[in-house]
Image (tube, rainbow, N blue to C red):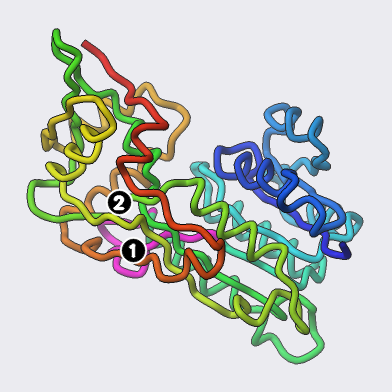
Amino acid sequence: MSRSICITAADGQIGHLITELLLSNQFRPKFKDLFCVTLHPEKCQDLKEKGAKIIPHTVSGHAGLAQDLRASGADTIFMIPPAHAHKLRLARDILKAVTAADIKNTVLLSVAGADLAEEKTQPHLRQFTKLETEVMGPRYTGPGSTKAGTSQCIIRAGFYAENLLQLPHETDVDNNIMLRLPIGNVNSFAPVALGDVVKVAANILVSEGPRGLSDRFRNQLITLTGPMMCNGVELAAAASQAGVNTEFANISDVEATQLLESNTDVDKQYLLEYYSLVREGKTNYVSTLDFAPITGEEPTNLPEFFKTYEFKTKK
């Protein structure tokens, strides 16, 4: 019960899900306090009502945030880089605040495939490797200089299956769905359910060991994908198993950009760059070995996922 946890970017979908899971009966007895850092406190009122304590994050630098974090007594932080035009700068401000506040345990949510991204063609994804390096940096600033860097963990999450639903997909007169994605016709990827990612993160955040996080997770790089590697046709087949007849159509980046234009809830550049990784053949793998040992469950397969969620469609 001594653990005090802080979640950054709590106003986003990932931040909301991890906060709600930590406040559930499964995890709530395992920590003392839960704090939510957010650029938009008005979007976190529901989390406040459920028991989280809200820490506003301004874009004016890290000093004020460091003071708030130190006053909170948080010893563990889950760093979710915000879906923001200045993602890297804001994430670096949070990391500086974490170091200044002597927060011992840091868990970073990164992206699987970021290490394969090219600076010129996928700069948005490449930013995550810079953050990974900087999160591990305090460990080497010298003994006793800061508690930050004592216990870190990086989670590289694959393409979120929920993002498959962000592009509006066409339907015909019989309500058959045409799944339109700019991933090419050859290569595959293994979308992971966001709920699976937060389950792993929650178990790591409440773990305890002699130096902070459990030694099972301390200094670990954990890559998570879904259990099913599929190309566009196989993805449509998985959706069809959920009861809606679905076919796949490859589209261009330009068309995908136009379709995403009206969607303000997603990081468009992240999506487009990840789709380009798929086209380049850099996502042809599955990484699920860590999931069951950490959560005690099996990862969500795609037909199960599609039974839970519905496509955005247009005629």
SS category of the residue bearing label 2: helix
Residue numbers of the magenta segment? 109-124
- Identify the residue shown where x is 11% and y is 33%: 249
Quadrant assignment, res 122:
bottom left
Q: As rendered, which of 68 and 205 lies closer to the eye?
A: 205
Left or right, residue 170 beside residue 65: left
Image height check: is 288 above or below 72? below
Left or right, residue 7 beside residue 230: right
Image height check: is 68 above or below 45? below
Q: 10 Å neighbourhood of mark 1: few (<14), some, or many (≥20)?
A: many
- Residue 265 placement (x, y as % from top left): 47, 30
Disc 2 + disc 1, Cβ < 8 Å: yes
- Identify the residue shown where x is 75% and y is 61%: 97
Q: 10 Å neighbourhood of mark 2: few (<14), some, or many (≥20)?
A: many
Q: As rendered, which of 28 and 258 lies closer to the eye?
A: 28
Quadrant assignment, res 212:
bottom right
From the image, tell me which residue sits under label 2. Answer: 274
- Looking at this view, name the residue that lies furthest to the top: 173
- Identify the residue shown where x is 77% and y is 57%: 5
Left or right, residue 79 beside residue 247: right
Quadrant for the N terminus in the image: bottom right
- Residue 77 placement (x, y as % from top left): 71, 60
Q: CA distance from mark 2 to mark 1?
A: 8 Å
Quadrant for the C terminus in the image: top left
Q: As rendered, which of 129 and 31 lies closer to the eye?
A: 31
From the image, tell me which residue sits under label 1. Answer: 113
Q: Does the magenta-highlighted stretch encompass residue 167?
A: no
Image height check: is 55 above or below 138? above
Left or right, residue 108 beside residue 105: left
Q: How many marks?
A: 2
**Residue type at tag 1:** Gly
**Residue type at tag 2:** Tyr
